[in-house]
Image (cartoon, rainbow, N blue to C red):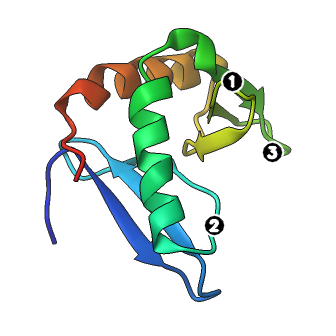
Amino acid sequence: NRTGARFDIFQGADERFYFNLHAANGEIVLSSQGYTTESAALSATFSVADNGIDQNRYEVNEASDGSYYFNLKARNGRVIGTSETYSTASNARRGCDGVIALLPNVELL
C-alpha cells in the first residue's frame, strides 16, 4: 500500500470505476461517484485538480445523522467528489481547506 498525496482509481464490486483522493498520511479525503469506464474516472481526477483549488466550488451539507460533509462541484454544478463525514460544519469547512492545500502537491498521471 502506497502512502502520500495521490489519487487511486479502482473498480468496485458493481464493476463501476471510482477514485479516492488520499492525503499525505494516506487518509481518504475525497471520493467519487461511480463511472462506467476507467477513463471517465481518470478524467474526473483532472476535474478535481482543476476545480478543487477554488473555495467557491465546495458546498458543506448536513447528513441525515447530523454530521457534516462537503461536495466538490464542477463548473457545471455537478458533484465530482464527496468527503468523509465530520462532527461539525466548521470541521467540514476545514476539510475543504485541507483539500485545497493538498491538490497542488498531487501528481496526476
Q: Quadrant of residue 87?
A: top right
Q: Earlier in the sequence, mark 3 or mark 1?
A: 1
Q: Secondary structure at mark 3?
A: loop
Nearest the camera: 30 or 41? 41
As measured in the structure, the alpha-carbon distance from the residue carrying label 1 to the one carrying label 2 is 21 Å
User: Which amino acid, mark 2?
Assistant: Gly
Q: How far from the left and from the top, in percent, is residue 43?
A: 46, 52
Q: Residue at x 41, y 74 (%)?
A: 10
Nearest the camera: 6 or 107? 107
Q: How far from the left and from the top, in percent, is residue 91?
A: 52, 22
Q: Is residue 12 above or below residue 84?
A: below
Compared across the picture, whether 21 is left or right of 23 comes to right
3 and 1 marks in contact (CB < 8 Å): no
Q: Secondary structure at mark 2?
A: loop
As measured in the structure, the alpha-carbon distance from the residue carrying label 2 to the one carrying label 3 is 23 Å
Which label was assigned to residue 34?
2
Nearest the camera: 75 or 3? 75
Compared across the picture, whether 104 is left or right of 52 comes to left
Q: How far from the left and from the top, in percent, is residue 44?
A: 50, 49
Q: Earlier in the sequence, mark 2 or mark 3?
A: 2
Q: Residue at x 63, y 30 (%)?
A: 74
User: Which amino acid, mark 1?
Assistant: Val
Give the class, few, some or many, for how many residues have Cα within 10 Å of label 3's Cα (few <14, many ≥20): few
The residue at the far right in this view is 64
Q: Earlier in the sequence, mark 1 or mark 2?
A: 2
The residue beneath circle 1 is 60
The residue beneath circle 3 is 65
Compared across the picture, whether 82 is left or right of 9 comes to right
1 and 2 marks in contact (CB < 8 Å): no
Nearest the camera: 106 or 42? 42
